[in-house]
Image (tube, helix red, strand yellow):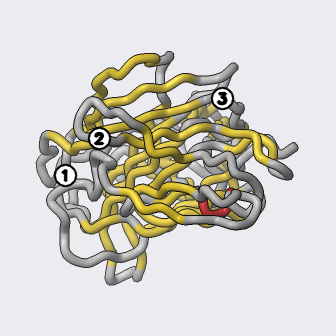
Amino acid sequence: MIKHFTLSIALLLAGTAFAQIPNASFENWTHTATSGAGGTAGYDQPVSWGTANAFISTLDSVYTCIKGTPALVGSYYIKLLSKAVPILGAIPGVAVTGAITVTGTTYSVSGGFPFNSRPANLTGQWQYMASGADQGHIVVFLSKWNSALNKKDTVSFTNYTLPGMAMTWASFSIPLTYQKGSIPDTAMILLASSGTTPVAGSYLSVDTLLFTGTVPSGVVTVVNDHATTTIYPNPAKDRATIYYYSLFSGQMTITITDIAGKIIRQQNSRIGIGSNDIQLDLSGLIRGNYLVNMTDGMGTDCKKLAIE
């Protein structure tokens, strides 16, 4: 049985900006009839959102995304359920404003929708329940195309872990964290009923999504909410260790600067989901205070380091 799922995210360049989130109240759905393992009834798909239902239809008739009704506002809402399916075992219910491709234990999401504002919060209505130690989450990416480097820059990244349980409909407001002061051109929202170790029975229902408030241009509020970081010993001499517990796998760039921001040393390290111990070579650095910046593609963390 497969227990761990990896989420791979790629934001693609989009065009004209929407004012708000497409199909934010989940009133619009399409139906796909199936004749394979999914049976003849088929599945429902929220317009402008990607789910794993098409993939699951080749294995089973138990889907992880369901058109819920009645809703508090309008007729429908989205319900995501972590389910046990043949071959794979327990898999999470995931929906994204884009497309989802399932390959083995990896959910790859891509796309996003055009968006050029700097909202302060993502708000809406939800119900959720976690089975065992499972925890669902909501992810918001805001990005901007960097034509000089031919890549997307992350303007804002927020990975919000669902706290406790909300067995009845409740309002929520998730504050967004900004890594850059620029205006984004693309947004992506991901909803998930489970974390990296899904447990069958967990669910997340969402309705009436809305971006609210404004964070002024130039304001940066870097908070690393997708990893836990410690540097030890601190103060250090010739060597130190970064303990980095991450929810994602990938490449991390570590940059040591002086207090004025001048780059003193830089290294790249591969990190995996879970605990990582990364060695820092401090030989040759003079006594004083430094900043250690750690960027892993999902966000940035910064720690002070004293060298004796």
Residue at screen point 66% across, 62% down: 55
- Asked if residue 146 lies left or right of residue 279, the reply is left
Q: Is residue 289 visible?
A: no
Question: Could you say which disc has been placed on residue 75 in the image?
Answer: 2
Identify the residue under disc 3: 201
- Amino acid under label 3? Gly
| The C terminus, quarter of image | top right
Q: x, y (%) of residue 264? A: 49, 57
Residue 174, above or below 238: above
Q: Give the distance between the C-alpha atoms of the residues marked 2 and 1, in whole angstroms.
A: 30 Å
Other-residue count near label 2 (Cα within 10 Å), few / some / many at <14 / 14–19 / ≥20: some
Question: Could you say which disc has been placed on residue 118 in the image?
Answer: 1
Q: Is residue 50 visible?
A: yes
Q: x, y (%) of residue 4? A: 75, 44
Residue 127, above or below 198: above
In-front residue for pair 208/231: 208
- Quick one: label 3 or label 2, which is nearer the N terminus? 2
